[in-house]
Amino acid sequence: MPNLETAPSPQKLRRIAIDPVTRVEGHGKVTILLDEENKVHQVRLHIVEVRGFEKFIEGRPYWEVPVIVQRLCGICPVSHHVAAAKAMDIIAGYGTLPPAAEKLRRLMHYGQMVQSHALHFFHLASPDLLLGFDSDLTRRNIMGVLADFPEIAKQGVFMRKFGQEVIHHTAGKRIHGTGAIPGGMNKALTQEERDLLRNGVDQIVEWAIGSVRMIEKLHLTNPRFYNHFAEFGTNMMGLVRSDGAMDLYHGGLRATDAGKKIIFDHADYSQYDRMLQEGVKPWSYMKFPYIKSLGPEHGWYKVGPLARVQICDFIPSPEAESERKKMMAMGEGRPVHGTLFYHWARLIELLHAAEVIRDLLDDPEILGKDLMADKGPWRGEGVGVIEAPRGTLFHHYRVDKDDLVTFCNLIVSTTNNNQAMNEAIRAVALQYLDGCEITEGLLNHIEVAIRAYDPCLSCATHALGQMPLEVSLQDAAGAMVSRLCRNSDGAIV
Amino acid sequence: MTIERYITIDGEIVHFGAGQTILQAALAAGVFIPHLCFHPDFGPHASCKLCTVTVDGRNGSACATPAMPGQEVHSDTPELNARRRVLLQMLFVEGNHFCPGCAKSGNCKLQALGYELEMFNAHYAHFYPNRGLDASHPDILLDRNRCIMCELCVRASRDVDGKSVFALAGRGRASHLVINSPSGKLGETEFALSDKAAHVCPVGAIMPKRVGYSVPIGERQFDHDSLRQKVKKHTEWRSSGEERDGATKELVNGSVAVNSVKEG
């Protein structure tokens, strides 16, 4: 594949912008540079906003952080809430959480998984998949799905609602609650709440199975297209349990190459900065992380459902594991890397999350009232990592002796996928746009590739003050006259 | 002939005791008049002006106006509530009151009044002042961003605790809370968590450390009852003599957030 990140001489090229990218969270745009023959020369996914949470969290007391950082996102606030709480458990000196507290946090987190995955698949992505990539633009939305596939749309809406209800009963609110606090949870689950959720969960598991079967059927209608759309091998990363099982709440870091050969395994995530490096590029507010040992060129990776489902040794719930095996069979022994497999993997995870919720609700310990861990000596620094719906999420803080945050580093799921998303849209551009008459339907293929990653662009942009900038003055022939550059450390050269 | 000791507030007859202000008489009778800087343990301050009522045709602070026989008081009127909303909006834009990330949310009187008076937006441009935190005290956090200059901490520290830890300095929009210590830091004072001044702040400016969000949503003071309902219920409970729940005890003790009503 030619390098489409930066065209050597962009001056005479025609620019197409998809601005904003729709049916994703946050604001982003895609720019494509084409020549007179519509040959593609440059494709970039730009993130056009800065959130700056890493900076403005500095100077706040640590107990506020798990609640404040939720405002990064309206889709998966629980992920930030729990990741920050896990970091604060360590910082404030708390030991292992009592079983009830950990199980409640898991319940909340898997509830988040159900609602976010349902939201993404049914509300955001299904219009492309069910109605067609280049179907009537005015109907290519959830209302169009409701009209043509009312039963599927209804199930999506209700599955999401169920996830929200799980969050409501564990965090106090469906969105931006306060359940997890440093050292444990602030609220036990009552018998009534447990029974209410338990009564609903079997239906959710059943619908989730139906959803996975639906995406499987879709792939089988045209395997050449669905299996190979924007296909490119990448490294993969995620958390796994000590026995190699999928665990979305806690575990060690595992990274593999495109063929599933281990790069590192069961790595302690508090040492994440020894394994990962965040790169910056002058044209995006979103950073480009990569695996240090492989360097920026080859070290980028993907996270999220498609990575998790493939790097784990098994999914510890029967229905989801059996669906996982079916998806893996499509690769005939090798990992699958077609971008649309993300949706399949996502629905397998939705099913898994529903099964986990069911099992947690059947566990008598979920009603436990002992919700706070014992407190030991102050530690002052901590890393919390979880598998958010979109992938591995890192929260790293330092807190001074007066209880105020002095340092915060977030590597958000979508940031981990930055390079992969850029590669995906470049693959699509070459596959479908290159040399063609550009239509809205073709441009939507680009968006389809981005959407598959379920990016949360509002979560992912924090490179405030570190944005490298380059200003160059060129004459009419494109020759450089002068150039000024600010590096990522702020130095002007 | 005895003079009947009652006034009317919005047409309702309210009896008062000797020396009571209109606000004291109202609260004792379960009639809610919005207020922020008043606390039953301290004399009137009359600075927030939220308790402004119309008494026999003239506007005055209910917390500083003695109740007099036959007064006709108007409080819950569209005009007065509109003015109160403006006062609240000015308080919100003058400081940095970010409820989504504030551990006082749900227990905060400023927030509760915002709901009570249906303040749907800030209307004015935010000042975004750079006021800063003082986290030097081991047990108590002072967040000046949220201070509304009601001087309850100043009064409590001076009049009850006998320490005079706090004072207001500066004028107008440069007003700010200062600490009576060589470095100006709270950690250098005798201030203690057991002090009255640590528990009178109606907003999230003075808060005990490490408590944060340990009280879940649904169990915070104003999660179910508005300020108005709290005042009304308190009076009903008091007159029925029933045992009060925890939240009401807090209310009665005048601590944490609701400082309007005192055990009679």
Image (cartoon, coloured by chain):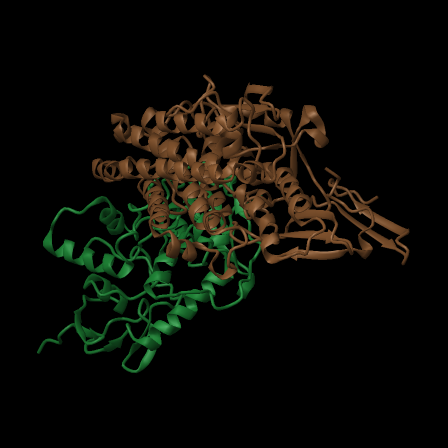
Above or below A392: residue B163: below
Q: Is residue A464 visible?
A: no
**According to the colouring, which chain is green?**
B
**According to the colouring, which chain is brown?**
A
Residue A356 image position (x, y, % from top left): 35, 30
Nearer to us in this view, A239 or A178: A239
Q: Is residue B31 left or right of residue A18?
A: left
Residue A184 image position (x, y, % from top left): 38, 31
Q: Residue at x 30, y 71 (%)?
A: B65
Nearer to us in this view, B154 or B87: B87
Q: Is residue A268 left or right of residue A200?
A: right
> In the displayed image of the protein, which residue is found farthest to the top?
A243
> In the displayed image of the protein, which residue is found farthest to the left?
B1
Q: Is residue A466 visible?
A: yes
Residue A287 image position (x, y, % from top left): 65, 40
Residue A106 image position (x, y, % from top left): 38, 31
